[in-house]
Amino acid sequence: MKKNKEGEVRKQEILDTSLQLFETTGYNKTTIQVILNEVGIGKGTFYYYFKSKEEILDTIVRNCFLSEFQSLKKLAEDNSLSAIEKINTLFSHSHEKCEYKRLQLKSRISSILLDEENISLFFKYTKYFFREAKTSYIQIIKQGIQEGSMKTTSASKTTRALLYNMIHQKASLEKKIKKEKDDK
């Protein structure tokens, strides 16, 4: 049992160090060798936990957003709320109950993905976010149609427009924050 705990600690150390390096050095400029040197491990240890640098970023992103997708699904399935109440909850972000640490992590991930060199990664994770959130949003919009509080002919198209708008607004805000930081 102790070995498992040590393994999880080592894996988290690789993730934390990699995130720090992705931020400071840039994702593309951070090589596996740089990660190995910074963590102080050999290639065998690295490849025991991860297949690639991309798998590290995948793990960081998925871990960060997993609880949000679970909360979103729970919200969509909550029969005590109307569709409008659910939408209001989504936009107020009260369903996230994000602690400061998680908000910082999301901001750090965004700064990596919004770097111009990483545009393909940004689109990859946008698709991931869309795929994971789509079903819950469609469920909420269909509920709104049934309740008569939403008027649309396609819950799927409305969901697509809503999610892309949210992603665009988030990206614009993060870029603005990054620019203001860089200007200081």
Image: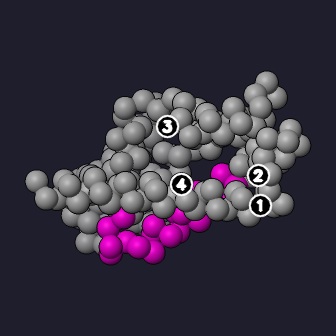
Residue 128 drawn in magenta: yes
Q: Position of residue 109 (x, y in %)?
A: 38, 54
Is the residue under label 2 in contact with that under label 1 (CB below 8 Å)? yes
Rendered location of residue 178, percent (x, y): 26, 57
Q: How many numbered marks, from 0 up?
A: 4
The alpha-carbon separation of the residues under discs 4 and 1 comes to 15 Å
Which residue type carries mark 1? Ser
Residue type at the position of mark 3: Asn
Residue indicated by mark 2: 138
- What stretch of residues is rendered in magenta? 114-134
Residue 46 x, y percent position in the rendering? 38, 59
- Per the model, the C-alpha gap separating discs 2 and 3 is 40 Å
Query: Dot 1: few (<14), some (14–19), or many (≥20) neighbours within 10 Å?
Result: some
Residue at 72%, 59% in the rendered image:
158
Label 4 to label 3, Cα distance in Å? Answer: 39 Å
Kindly identify which numbered label has been placed on residue 166.
4
| Residue holding disc 3 | 4
Q: Are marks 4 and 3 in contact (CB under 8 Å)?
A: no
Task: Give yes or no for residue 131 being in the magenta stretch.
Answer: yes
Callout in the foreground (1, 3) = 1
Circle 1 is placed at which residue position?
A: 156
Please, what is the three-letter code of the amino acid marked with disc 4? Answer: Met
Task: Examine the residues drawn in magenta and state their main secondary structure.
Answer: helix
- Residue 143, percent from left and from top: 83, 42
